[in-house]
Amino acid sequence: MKDDRIKVYFDTEFIAKPFHLELISIGMVREDGETYYAISSEFDSNNAKPWVKENVIALLEPEITPKTIAQIREEILMFLAHRTPEFWAYYASFDWVIFSWIMQDMNAMPAHYPKYCNDLRQEVARLKFPKKEIPRAHNKHNALDDALWNQQLHQLLIDFEQGRG
């Protein structure tokens, strides 16, 4: 069997309250350049703090039709079909919890999916990568733009570790 592993960079935007998370949007980019972006139809903007309303919800692309979590799950499964993903996110904790919930729970994920996510922020710390060298995000708090930024950062970290940085 050929190697079907592929790096998948992702980000989520969400509403967070104690013991409560709601997906607003998710963006993913595979290392082959293919992207996925979805906005949830199931979040309640009334639960969002003013900052989230102004910096995330107000900037959602109006031409994109929101989808149910079930639709998003099916589309992600198709986006990653026939591949073994290696997941990467920046400050990944909440993103990974939300991704696991999208998949229903970790045990409901396809068996070949890892049950963990690699954290780019931890890689920055492990490598002692200079903070001033971390690129600025172009469109912060757009999940797809942030996923693309994650991919860019990971390549910088790889180059840095291999002495090309």
Image: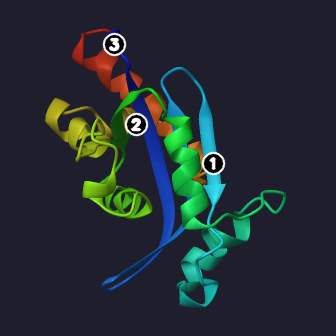
Q: CA distance from mark 1 to mark 3?
A: 26 Å
Residue carrying label 3: 3
Q: Which quadrant of the rendered structure holds the N terminus?
A: top left
Q: CA distance from mark 3 to mark 2?
A: 31 Å
Q: Earlier in the sequence, mark 1 or mark 2?
A: 1
Residue 50, image quadrant: bottom right
Q: Nearer the viewer, residue 37 or 132?
A: 37
Q: CA distance from mark 1 to mark 2?
A: 24 Å
Question: Quick one: SS at disc 3?
Answer: loop
Q: Position of residue 4 (x, y in %)?
A: 38, 18
Question: Quick one: SS at disc 2?
Answer: loop
Residue sitting at 48 percent across and 35 percent down? Answer: 80
Residue carrying label 2: 134
Crowding at mark 2 (Cα within 10 Å: few <14, some 14-19, many 20+): few
Image height of 97 relative to 31, above or below:
below
Q: Earlier in the sequence, mark 1 or mark 3?
A: 3
Residue sitting at 29 percent across and 35 percent down? Answer: 112
Kind of residue indicated by mark 2:
Ile
Q: Earlier in the sequence, mark 3 or mark 2?
A: 3
Q: Position of residue 136 (x, y in %)?
A: 51, 42
Kind of residue indicated by mark 1:
Tyr
Q: In the rendered structure, find residue 37 and report the number of the disc placed on it.
A: 1
Question: Quick one: SS at disc 1?
Answer: strand
Q: Nearer the viewer, residue 76 or 21?
A: 76
Residue sitting at 23 percent across and 18 percent down? Answer: 161
Residue 138, image quadrant: top right
Kind of residue indicated by mark 3:
Asp
